[in-house]
Amino acid sequence: MATGIVSIAAHLLSYDIVGWFLLGTNALAYPALLVITLCRLVRYPRAVHTDIVDHGRWPGFLALVAATAVLGSQLSIYHVLPQALPWLLGLAAGLWHVVTYRFLAAMTIGQRKPGLRTGLNGTWLLLVVATESIAVLAAAVASIYGASTPLDLLALAAWLLGGSLYMMLITLIFYRWCFVPLATADLTEPWWINMRAMVITTFAGSRLILAGRSLAGWPGDGQFVL
């Protein structure tokens, strides 16, 4: 995920050699990490399930969603394998549904729940990052394959959902910071994802504005986002 982001930034800043090198790195790293994850799922399904329904560990699986979508965005920027983009979009959306709904179902019906201090940290904002990355990739696929209402609706829905999730999560995080005692160790948690979640939400909105297509009788998603 980080490699893809830096690669796209390098391309936008005209550091193409660096960008292509990082694209090649991702072309090797992503399949390798995906295979390792699948091997763990096959060999230790109970351990994987335990992690997915755990308040502290489940957000890590959302990095797989974001990495898949970022790889697709990276390929679209470099105009490589455009036929793979719809498949990566479908894979990212499918992984999002599996991870998110499984955890939310377990969290809702579970009787033993941790408090904010032990159950919530900055990694929860990966839910926003993963959701908005799908919006960005959907907009990229729509721009390559032409106007498509389903893709535009997917991009807009993911952007709106990611924004709503950000508002809910950042409110809980602010409450924890201000009203729950913080130990020194708590400050080492990945709170910096707050900035990343905000940045990708803004970026996804800008892609929708640039797309500027009409959606289901609305005046246009660009005007709506504004």
Image (spheres, rainbow, N blue to C red):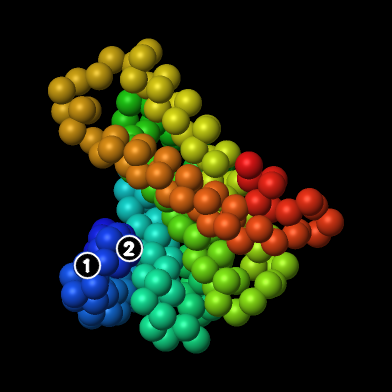
Indicate the secondary structure of the residue bearing disc 1: loop
Q: Is residue 77 visible?
A: yes
Distance CA(mark 2)–CA(mark 1): 8 Å
**Residue bearing mark 2:** 12
Q: Amino acid at mark 2?
A: Leu
Label 1 neighbour load within 10 Å: few <14, some 14-19, many 20+: few
Residue drawn where x is 50% and y is 86% of the image? 83
Residue drawn where x is 80% and y is 52% of the image? 218
Q: Is residue 64 visible?
A: no
Residue drawn where x is 52% and y is 51% of the image? 206
Q: Are discs 2 and 1 less than 8 Å apart at CB?
A: no
Name the quarter where the C terminus is drawn.
top right
Q: Is residue 32 left or right of residue 184?
A: right
Q: Amino acid at mark 1?
A: Tyr
Q: Is residue 145 left or right of residue 203?
A: right
Residue 160 position within the rendered picture, expressed as x and y whole percent measured from the top left: 61, 46
User: Taking 93 as reference, is 210 above or below it?
Assistant: above
Residue 145 position within the rendered picture, expressed as x and y whole percent measured from the top left: 60, 79
Residue 26 or 21: which is nearer the viewer?
21
Quadrant of the rendered image containing residue 198? top left
Label 2 neighbour load within 10 Å: few <14, some 14-19, many 20+: few
Q: Which mark is residue 159?
A: none
Residue 71 or 64: which is nearer the viewer?
71
Residue 147 position within the rendered picture, expressed as x and y whole percent measured from the top left: 68, 72
Indicate the secondary structure of the residue bearing disc 2: helix
**Residue bearing mark 1:** 15
User: Taking 35 as reference, is 46 above or below it?
Assistant: above
Residue drawn where x is 35% and y is 39% of the image? 195
